[in-house]
Image (cartoon, rainbow, N blue to C red):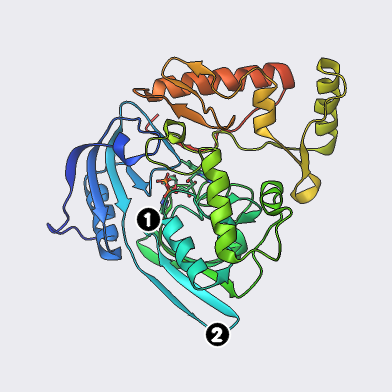
Amino acid sequence: MLYSVTNLLRTQENIPLAPLTTFQVGGPARYFVEAHSEYEVSEAVAFAFARKLPLFVLGGGSNLVIADSGWAGLVLKVAMSGVEFEGDLQKMVFHASAGENWDDFVALAVSKNCCGIECLSGIPGTVGGTPVQNVGAYGQEVSETITRVVALEIATGQRVELKNADCGFSYRSSFFNSTRRDQYIVLEVSYLLHRNGEPRIEYADLKKFFAGRQGKPSLQQVRDAVRSIRQSKAMLLVQGDEDCRSAGSFFKNPLVSAAEADRIQALAETRAPGITMPRYPAAAGQVKLAAAWLVEQSGFNKGYSLGPVGISRKHTLAIVNRGGATAKDIVALKEQIEKKVFDIWGVSLQPEPVFVGF
Ligand SMILES: Cc1cc2nc3c(=O)[nH]c(=O)nc-3n(C[C@H](O)[C@H](O)[C@H](O)COP(=O)(O)OP(=O)(O)OC[C@H]3O[C@@H](n4cnc5c(N)ncnc54)[C@H](O)[C@@H]3O)c2cc1C
């Protein structure tokens, strides 16, 4: 037997999951446990194995759509905390436990004057969630700084150390959410950051924010700017702002060939002469399209509603729960948008959040 079961684990039954997610939808977990140590993580896996229960690993619940029927197995909430760091005057490596709040961790790095993740300020969720979809925003991705992911390989019970190249990072993807999906529990992530380095100000919104200001902004000023821009788009969790009752951007920006991008641009011009479709160079000669533009050009504007769900009043790419919504309502709007975008533009949008229990 790979795992041993003891009676020490404090499992709970029929725990509502909606309050544990930023969307605030979804049914209960048949069994639920919060793990505060690696030992408790192993115990929880043993519990699931012994009862042949499907296991779902929960971080901060900020990238999830949980089914109205909930999860029939065990939900394991990763709650290990602690950050250690080592380094010299130039470089610092931060080893952060998976259950640490991501934005608190960014704040800590910035307070130590270490750059490399400042543009990822204000993203909700946990440290452990960041390698899963290679979290990115405002010109940075965690794959640029992650040096090591310590994880529990569920099938073998082995604690493994994965290097950056092992994780298969690409745009909003890693092997944790693709080829090796549901096979690992992230326990700790190490990030290599640079002391006293220059903050990255490459993204258009950030450049605009600092345009005309004297001198170079500090790391802290860049962090504050990112949080302020995010707040204006309801991409920062702010109490009382119902536009952030979401999972952030609902669709990934499509990656297409240059020829496909030209086709869509030509189509756009037949619909609105002179219009320019946003397009950005991406890896391997591909072109990244703006999902928000496609959604808008398909007739879905900010504030659009479909029953208790809708599109954020501040961001076209965020589907929001306006209060009392179900997962079924979210899926109905998702499908309506996907169909219209495909019918008009021939582009299949891919959702960014993880669908649980469907
Ligand atoms: C307002 C808002 C703004 C957002 N902005 C951005 C953004 O700018 N950029 C961006 O990339 N994302 C963004 N997101 C999405 C989300 O915050 C990130 O994807 C975040 O990293 C998810 O982490 P989490 O801990 O909440 O994971 P969860 O939502 O709990 O889980 C997401 C997935 O990761 C898995 N997972 C979580 N923790 C672990 C672990 N320890 N081990 C193994 N698997 C695990 C889960 O099983 C699930 O498959 C936003 C979300 C919201 C609500």
Residue that appears at 26% across and 48% down? 48
- Amino acid type at mark 2: Asp
Pointer 1 local density, CA inside 10 Å: few below 14, some 14–19, many at least 20: some
Q: Can you see residue 161?
A: no
- In the image, 95 versus 91, the foreground residue is 91
- In the image, 73 versus 131, the foreground residue is 131
Residue 255 lies in quadrant = top right
Pointer 2 local density, CA inside 10 Å: few below 14, some 14–19, many at least 20: few
N-terminal-most mark, 1 or 2: 2
Residue 224 locus on image (x, y percent): 54, 55
Q: Is residue 139 left or right of residue 114?
A: right
- In the image, 49 versus 200, the foreground residue is 200
Q: Which residue is mark 1?
A: 154
Residue that appears at 69% across and 65% down? 216
Residue that appears at 54% across and 19% down? 304
- Disc 1 to disc 2: CB gap under 8 Å: no
Q: Residue furthest bottom?
A: 88
- Amino acid type at mark 1: Ile
Residue 246 locus on image (x, y percent): 45, 34
Relative to 227, is 100 above or below? below
Query: Is label 2's Cβ within 8 Å of ligand 1?
Result: no
Q: Secondary structure at mark 1?
A: loop
Q: Which residue is mark 2?
A: 88
Residue that appears at 13% across and 59% down? 8
Distance (Cα) linking label 1 and label 2: 35 Å
Q: Quadrant of the C terminus?
A: top left
Relative to 228, is 314 above or below? above
Mark in the foreground, 1 or 2: 2
In the rendered structure, find residue 288 and report the number of the disc placed on it: none
Residue 186 lies in quadrant = bottom left
